[in-house]
């Protein structure tokens, strides 16, 4: 196993000090290789050391101004610090440099979502969902964006797709319940809220939804 691969393996195993030592040694042996700085930046980001992570990613971009993954890393640093405008810029830069993977599209979409720019989030989350069709988290956030922009039929089918890959997804059931309630399909809504609570008994929103329906049914008796 190559040295840099071993460092990444240490990260996956949670051996962060060992990973840091490997990346430090790699930088000392080849200080002009941006990959080593990116990997160290990823480690620091994982450790929530955002200031140092940003410095390592910046160094990588100085060595290679087309290092797309470094810009993706910078986007994550800014996102975690809620600097959404800066995060958008970095994610867009990573994509423009050819990082054609689900992650940058997903994070760019999430940045627009967190900035409450729901319509602008849609094309990026849609692209992420196309690139990673089996990722329940990606599909769920795409479904949320569809729901928040009033595209309830598409949101419904997307949440159902989430449940195909992850049956125990309480939030997907909850949101399907909300859509069913909006469509006045009371029995379906109650069923989804119950399923959400079965998976996650402390799901407050599903609990509130169930109480609303039960109160509604009592009043109609």
Image (cartoon, grey):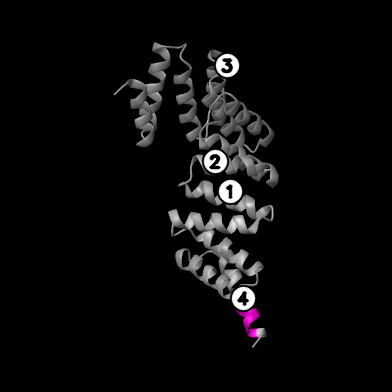
Q: Which mark is residue 128?
A: 2
Residue at the spot of label 3: 65
Q: Name the residue rendered at 55%, 54% in the picture.
A: 158
Of residues 162 and 154, which is closer to you in this image?
154
Q: Quadrant of residue 199?
A: bottom left
The mark that comes first in sequence, 2 or 1, is 2
Number of the label disc, if any, that sits on residue 142: 1
On screen, residue 35 above or below 143: above
Disc nearer the start of the sequence (2/3): 3
Secondary-structure class at tag 3: loop
Q: Quick check: marks 2 and 3 in contact, CB under 8 Å?
A: no
Which portion, as a residue range, is magenta? 214-218
With respect to residue 39, does 81 lie above or below? below
Q: Earlier in the sequence, mark 1 or mark 4?
A: 1
Distance from the alpha carbon under mark 4 to that under mark 2: 35 Å
What element does badge 2 sit on? Answer: helix
Q: Position of residue 115 (x, y in %)?
A: 69, 43
Does residue 132 appear left or right of residue 153 in this picture?
A: left
Magenta span includes 110: no
State if disc 1 and disc 2 touch (CB < 8 Å).
yes
Helix, strand or loop under label 1: helix
**What secondary structure is the magenta-colored segment mainly?**
helix
Position of 122 compared to 157: left or right?
right
Q: Quadrant of residue 36?
A: top left
Q: Which residue is mark 4?
A: 213
Q: CA distance from mark 3 to mark 1?
A: 31 Å
Residue 29 at x, y percent in the picture: 39, 11
Residue 221 seen in this snapshot:
yes
Quadrant into which the N terminus falls? top left
Frontmost residue, 167 versus 50: 167
């Amino acid at each position: 196993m190559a040295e840099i691969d071993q460092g990444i393996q240490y990260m996956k195993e949670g051996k962060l000090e060992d990973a840091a030592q490997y990346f430090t040694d790699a930088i000392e042996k080849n200080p002009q290789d941006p990959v080593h700085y990116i990997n160290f930046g990823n480690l620091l980001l994982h450790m929530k050391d955002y200031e140092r992570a940003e410095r390592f990613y910046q160094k990588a971009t100085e060595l290679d101004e087309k290092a797309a993954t470094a810009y993706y890393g910078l986007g994550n640093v800014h996102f975690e610090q809620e600097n959404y405008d800066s995060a958008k810029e970095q994610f867009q830069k990573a994509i423009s440099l050819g990082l054609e993977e689900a992650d940058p599209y997903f994070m760019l979409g999430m940045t627009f979502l967190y900035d409450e720019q729901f319509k602008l989030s849609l094309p990026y989350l849609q692209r992420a969902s196309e690139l990673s069709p089996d990722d329940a988290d990606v599909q769920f956030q795409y479904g949320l964006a569809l729901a928040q922009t009033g595209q309830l039929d598409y949101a419904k089918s997307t949440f159902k797709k989430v449940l195909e890959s992850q049956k125990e997804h309480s939030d997907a059931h909850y949101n399907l319940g909300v859509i069913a309630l909006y469509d006045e399909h009371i029995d379906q809504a109650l069923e989804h809220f119950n399923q959400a609570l079965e998976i996650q008994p402390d799901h407050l929103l599903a609990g509130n939804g169930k109480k609303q329906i039960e109160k509604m049914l009592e009043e109609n008796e």
